[in-house]
Amino acid sequence: MMTSNNYRRLLFCAGAIAVSPTLGWTFTKPHDLDIAISRDESTLIAFVMPELASCKKLESEWELVEKKHPRTAVVDCGENAEYCFKQDVLTHPTVRVYFPDNTMERYRGPRKADPILSFVKRIHRPILPVTDKNETAFLNSDEVVIIGRLPPLTEEPESELLHKRFAAVAHRYRDRYTFGIQTITGDSSSASLKCQNNIDGLGHDTPDLTRVPAMESFVKICGTPLVGELSRRTELSLVKASKSMVHYFTDSEEDKEAYIAAIRPLAQKYREYLNFVTIDVNEYPDMTTSVGHRKGASRVVAVQNPHTWQAYPLEEGSEVSAASVEQFILAITQNKVAPWDGTPKEDKLVETADEGVGEVEEQEEGETNASHDEL
């Protein structure tokens, strides 16, 4: 069994530790926090290790959260390792909302104030009614919006089951997406789902509401961005998707956003075959060495096959644009680029170009899941 001391040592090994400790956090003792949770409607909590660079990045954002949300708390897991261990907090920072009945909701989004505040609003928001008059406004009210177009609820078993299924899916994904319900004429066979992904400007429709898995699959597809971000939460789902991954490593939030905006049309064009992913090199400095780049290299691209783990690094210093990345992908599929031979970048003296060549494989998208999902 893992002890709290072992747990704390594990945490310090899990991420890059900043040189100087954070001084701006206001911490809450576990005993006081338990009392606050039992008394308040809900409590938004950040579990942090002040020494970690990832937690320092959240600090200024959390100050904005505290100004707009009245019930917040911060737990120092360095000083309260046993308490954090009991709460199953294994990554930092972890953000959750706790309720008096001992239930909680995990936050899975970016460490930014606006997404965190939107998350809090969603989990307190019921399924909203949608009409023809407010449908357009509703579809643009959040990053991802799902409307259940259902016939009126009756005492018929089929009608009750359909509404319960939609309510169950809406509850499960309420932390990420906004849900509404629109009453239509007809019977259960006329029901459908409509989804608007405003991140990528894409709309989706489906008539298949016969099973909960079908609803969930639809919601996942609509909610998945064209250009995702690699994290402990998403890495397993990316591997399970069985698509080759186009990695972009960057050390800047502004550069990441600029890259996403430029590469989004290309990601849409090849979404059936490729996953386009950004990676924060500040948090994963060693990952670049696993795809043929030097440690900590930023603003570089590499394509990787999840079946063979062959990697194809685009030469550092090359132009990174939608056109250049597409040209590089096509060169790989045409056997014009050799995979990385595994030699560390710093030690590599002679580049080879006549090794065996891999190929970007075309695979169906798989189901996604992850054990710890708060990064």
Image (spheres, rainbow, N blue to C red):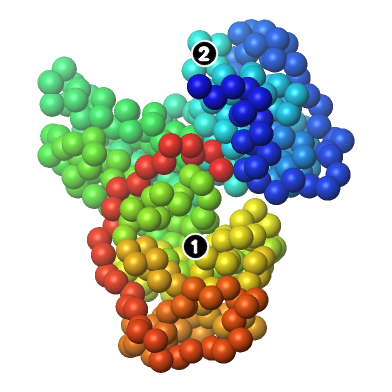
Give the number of marks: 2
Per the rendering, the mark at residue 102 is 2
| Secondary structure type for disc 1 | strand
Q: Nearer the viewer, residue 187 or 40?
A: 40
Q: Is residue 52 left or right of residue 216?
A: right
Residue 130 falls left or right of residue 320:
left
Residue 12 point in image, percent of width and height: 68, 39
- Give the mark nearest the N terminus, 2 or 1: 2
Which x, y percent locates residue 104?
Answer: 51, 22
Residue under numbered circle 1: 277
Residue under the image location 41 percent in, 49 percent down: 236
Q: Which mark is residue 189?
A: none
Q: CA distance from mark 2 to mark 1?
A: 36 Å
Q: Assess whether mark 1 and mark 2 are in contact (beta carbons under 8 angstroms).
A: no
Residue 238 visible from this viewpoint: yes
Q: Position of residue 14 (x, y in %)?
A: 62, 43
**As displayed, is residue 331 above or below residue 312?**
below
The reply to whether residue 117 is in sight is: no
At label 2, the amino acid type is Asn
* Residue closest to the eye, 340 or 315: 340
Query: Which quadrant holds the C terminus?
Result: top right
Vertical placement of residue 293 versus 278, above or below:
below
Q: Label 1 amino acid?
A: Val
SS for callout 2:
loop
Q: Toward which corner of the image does residue 356 lie, by quadrant?
A: bottom left
